Image (cartoon, coloured by chain):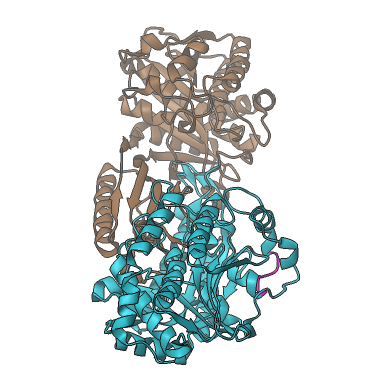
Chain colours: A brown, B cyan
Amino acid sequence: MDIPDPDTIKAAAQAQRAAMQALFDKLRQDGLDEPGVSRDPYGAGEQRAHATVTKAAEALGLEIGHDAAANLYMTLPGRDRTAPVLVIGSHLDSVPHGGNFDGAAGVLAGLAIVAALRTMRLTPECDIVVMGIRAEESVWFQVSYIGSRGSLGTLPDGALDARRVDTGRTLAEHIADCGGDPQALHPRARHFDPSRIRAYLELHIEQAPSLVEAQRPVAICTGIPGNFRYPDAWIEGCHDHVGLPRRFRHDAAMAGAEFAMALDAAWADYDARGIPMACTLGRFHTDPAAHGLTIVPGAFYFSLDVRAYDETILAELKEKVGQIIDGIEQRRAVRFHLGPQAHAAVGLVDPAIKAGLEAAAGTQGVAVLQIGSPASHDAAAFAAAGVPMGMIFVRNENGSHNPHEAMAIEDFIDGACILIQWVATVLTGRDR
Amino acid sequence: MDIPDPDTIKAAAQAQRAAMQALFDKLRQDGLDEPGVSRDPYGAGEQRAHATVTKAAEALGLEIGHDAAANLYMTLPGRDRTAPVLVIGSHLDSVPHGGNFDGAAGVLAGLAIVAALRTMRLTPECDIVVMGIRAEESVWFQVSYIGSRGSLGTLPDGALDARRVDTGRTLAEHIADCGGDPQALHPRARHFDPSRIRAYLELHIEQAPSLVEAQRPVAICTGIPGNFRYPDAWIEGCHDHVGLPRRFRHDAAMAGAEFAMALDAAWADYDARGIPMACTLGRFHTDPAAHGLTIVPGAFYFSLDVRAYDETILAELKEKVGQIIDGIEQRRAVRFHLGPQAHAAVGLVDPAIKAGLEAAAGTQGVAVLQIGSPASHDAAAFAAAGVPMGMIFVRNENGSHNPHEAMAIEDFIDGACILIQWVATVLTGRDR
């Protein structure tokens, strides 16, 4: 029952390199949609990725299963098959014309880990489930974490009626297309009982250049941000003539600009105090049907996403948004209409898992950073369901959600190596 | 050759009230395009207005003519038909879903004046040309003063190739549709020789609420602003993931917001120093094809119009725009592309005409303000061509370029009355 020595683990990780490279190449080929790759969730792109990953798992002798949300379960049996399981996974969909690594790297890391355990002839105490999760990217159905929340029984009301922005068909229809059972998802049934999950681990490419900047291959995640969002907000002013003096204007675009600058100033202030957050006005625009060179904008539209790693900070920021709006409404004689609000809870990383991953990195001699996740991940859905969660990030050039994602296979193997060390340390013993 | 007494002039002006109201009503009906009216230049809307006005002019026995730009000339013959003429006019187009008075009021004022002269049996010294000018509103072709500059031979290079934003067809095609001769406009031929014009007078609704605020019906114009414009500017940043930390972003929308706020601050400063100007970002928007809730905007588009009454101030402001951009480019790692630039010269009011209009208002007992025009007008094109020019503004609620323009017919008649008094004073004598 000894833990293999670090060099044995490193060698077992390195041994997966060629197979993993080939698998990444196959996935790129499957999803090619120049520029970049498109793995449309519950569609042809994601289906091809599922087929490729399933084939690789079968070659490793893993048990294959699915749930009502058509998530893919690839199980390495443990010694106690009744014990809560370890889940290692991520999603297999991508944004349109995205990169090859956002999501897929985490699923392949799971396969690399079980393959390495096999190489070392180690049997874990409990089942290890490598999970290929469906439909994480919210750009398609405007609903996030569909696969993971579908399995955990935490999908929001109405999610199954959401329509994919390109096909116009409902999520329920798309799930049925892919062999899932949307009816069974309706009563929020738990298909994967959180109490049956010992821990959830996810490897993901970093979506910011912190690791590139610091010249480190891997980071240990300190937390996943929660957010509040106003997807469809607007400012009501008055359309007026280009020559109108300043004191008479109700310029909705200037009000939008002031709003943006006030949020940006607040963000700079939090940054200066070392409190991580982010604020994005992704849509930020005058009315294409009414704007023009000689018209003072009378309406201005925006989306807002504010994220932070601490619910207290989120609450503080939400209050700040209200104060900023009050001031602008008074100064500029306009009216803000925030519209519907969405909220995602902060995803707390389990301290013991985080400490274990740091120790594993130390044992393996991989120099790591500690960073808050810039983005949301399926891991947050597991954490919200009460599952102890940990994540690591792998260095990636050029950001994610674009065709230029660039993860070196060496960095990926460094990440996998840390996870194997952790798994070997906490839940395996040498077979026989 | 005596000038009629003020009460006779007032009565002659008042006598036009019912006919003018009927004509405004007919124009509204012609252009109805809820909400508001649309008189699209060199299109169906403007054509209907031309037909209605032509019919009214024919009823008054005026001579009807056109030039290569398809402007409408409605001439009351004077005693000396070879003498330089007095032009009274404005434009007959409108912005999309605009009001009924911006432009049209000035043409109808011309008709009211010649009708009143007829009522009083006065024949002017020289021809009075009521001019129905084409295509003043720059929102359609992104070129201003098309009709007046077409007639004066001062259209900018490339203007005939400009495409109407809604139809996508060129100005040349549209002019030909309406019976004009775009070929003849090409060599910048003067169709209306400025040396043949004694003076240009224009009545226009006020486009700001200064008269409403001051409770006066009419204002004498002290000047028309010049401007510089960037109709198609944009900011190049990077599209990135919503979670990207602030220091890594190249957020084009935030850069646009900072630009807007810096211009607004400069404007507030000029206002405080009593120097009139205006600054409008009429189009101000992220890319509809690429923006989204979870994407940091990598491109931002805007139009800019900056106007002032003094060429020195305009030059100062243009330099300021450059300085603001330099700072933002450095701070936010983005790049501004200003694109083509347009410029309109400041329109200087002829001091003798202005003094004459003030005296006429005094004679008629109409309490007037003196204000700088908030907006550009065809009058500025005549002034730039060397024609002595004067303007008056009529009180108007709710601004212009919107469906809610509201000019009382009483105020319009007060304005016409001032112009009749001026015309009777300077260039008429009693017939026989």
Instruction: Please tell me which residue is depicted at 28% across the width and 83% down the height of the picture.
Output: B7
Residue B417, relative to residue A401: is it above or below?
Answer: below
Work out whether residue B125 or residue A163 is closer to the camera in this orientation and state it.
B125
Left or right: where A387 falls relative to A31:
left
Residue A40, relative to residue B30: is it above or below?
Answer: above
Does the stretch in magenta take in B200? Answer: no
- The N terminus of chain B sits in image quarter: bottom left
Tell me where residue B220 appears, x and y as whole percent. 37, 82
Tell me where residue A6 appears, x and y as whole percent. 55, 30
Residue B26, relative to residue A179: is it above or below?
Answer: below
Work out whether residue B269 or residue A249 is closer to the camera in this orientation and state it.
A249
Tell me where residue B306 appears, x and y as whole percent. 49, 72
Instruction: Please tell me which residue is depicted at 36% across the width and 34% down the height of the picture.
Output: A349
The residue sitting at the front extreme is B432
Q: Mark yes or no: residue A98 visible.
A: yes
Tell me where residue A346 appears, x and y as whole percent. 33, 37
| Count of numbered badges drawn on the protein | 0
Tell me the quarter of the picture where residue B423 sits: bottom left
- Majority secondary structure of magenta residues: loop
Residue A103, relative to residue B383: is it above or below?
Answer: above
Left or right: where A397 falls relative to A165:
right
Tell me the magenta residue range: B153-158
Does the stretch in magenta take in B155? Answer: yes
Q: Mark yes or no: residue B268 visible.
A: no
